[in-house]
Amino acid sequence: MDQSVRTLTPEIEVEATAAGSGARKKLLIALAGVVALAGAGYAAFDITVAAKHAATDNAYVDAETAEVTALTSGPVADVRVVDTQAVKKGDILVVLDDADRRLELEQAKAALGQALRKMQSIQANSGSLSGQIAARQADLIRAKAELQRAQVEYDRRHPLAGTGAISGEEMTTVKTNLEAAQAAFEQAQANLRAAQGAHEANDALIQGAPLDQNPEVAAARARVDQAEVALSRTVVRAPVDGIVTKRTVQVGQMVQPGALLMTVVPVQAAYVTANFKEVQLKKVRVGQKAELTSDLYGKDVVYHGRVVGFSGGTGAATAIVPAQNATGNWIKVVQRLPVRIALDPRELAAHPLKVGLSMDADINLAD
């Protein structure tokens, strides 16, 4: 009995070994089949799906924020908004004390009035100077006639001076009268030229343009307009619709032109900046459609966008301290390029987003 068991045991061991080897062979074949099937499936997925999509989770909400700055100086009289408050374009945000600006406006208006009165006076003088010219012309005519008469008297008596027909005293008087008439005539000419010069100088101030367009009046009026603009800027209004953030201004604060008061974020015009790897961008084009989801709402809310542009450089290249690859310890790293994706305004209104929120972006390359 024991001998038979001992003689059969090797055969059983051989059969068991063969059976185990066959099972392992089948298992390896099955495993190889699974691997081949998985590879074929991945290849099919890559060809039919992945090759037609470029996706990234390195994306975030962005917007063209509006920085609200002071455009004139003055103490802050009132601040009408707080952080997180929604505002409409034109809403009053900050009011500055306008006392100084009002005084400047009144001074400019007074200077304009003086310029207008000065020009009006010059216009009135033009008529007076025209009358003076006419009077000087009449004086010149009289002086010329007196000179001609004195010349005739002198010419009549001068030939008789040596004959004793007239006395020396009479001849002296005639000569003196001629010289006086000549001097009076020259003075009349000078007076006429002076009157004409004064008239021309007066006309040069008002000639060629109506009173309101006179250069001096126009300059004074421009100063009034400038003062009115400065006064209007004491009321700071929202430049766009959006949400107030980073408000730094306080009542009583003295602000100067250019001082940052707050930022208004137009969340209704938000877009997505998606940072794709450079190896993903070969087939990405402007105008291609994209689907996006946010961490805020999850996968249930899908936004439909469109590629509108590419950044001019990678984040590393445009950083404040760019990478220096000229050293000997350089290691190549796959770079990412920001891609701007516009969102559907209706979807954005239904599910608002805030700047900086994380997004997942999937661009359809088949478009």
Image (tube, grey):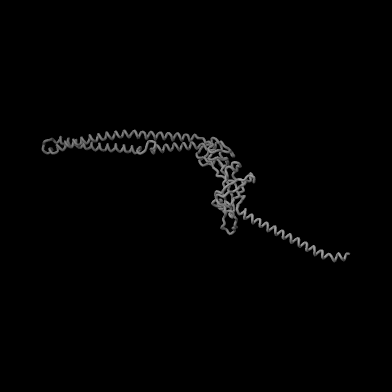
Report which quarter residue 37 is drawn in.
bottom right
The percent position of residue 25, horizontal first and vertical second, equals 74, 61
Residue 187, compared with residue 331, is above or below; it is above
Residue 239 versus residue 341: which sits nearer the camera? 341
Q: Is residue 309 left or right of residue 25?
A: left
Residue placed furthest toward the right: 1
In the image shown, does 337 or 150 lie closer to the viewer? Answer: 337
Q: Is residue 176 visible?
A: no
25 vs 55, left or right, is right
Horizontal relation, residue 2 to residue 188: left or right: right
Could you say where residue 160 lies in the image, as x and y percent from the top left?
Answer: 12, 37
Above/below status of 11 relative to 364: below
Q: Nearer the viewer, residue 233 or 154?
A: 233
Residue 67 sits in quarter: top right
Q: Write the residue at 51% across / 42% down.
A: 258
The x, y position of residue 265, in whole percent, is 56, 42
Quarter of the N terminus within the rendering: bottom right
Q: Position of residue 172 (x, y in %)?
A: 16, 36
Disc tally is: 0
Pick whichever, 297 or 321, lies toward us: 297
Taking the spot 59% from the left edge, 57% from the top edge, the residue there is 332
* Residue 366 visible somewhere in the drawing: yes
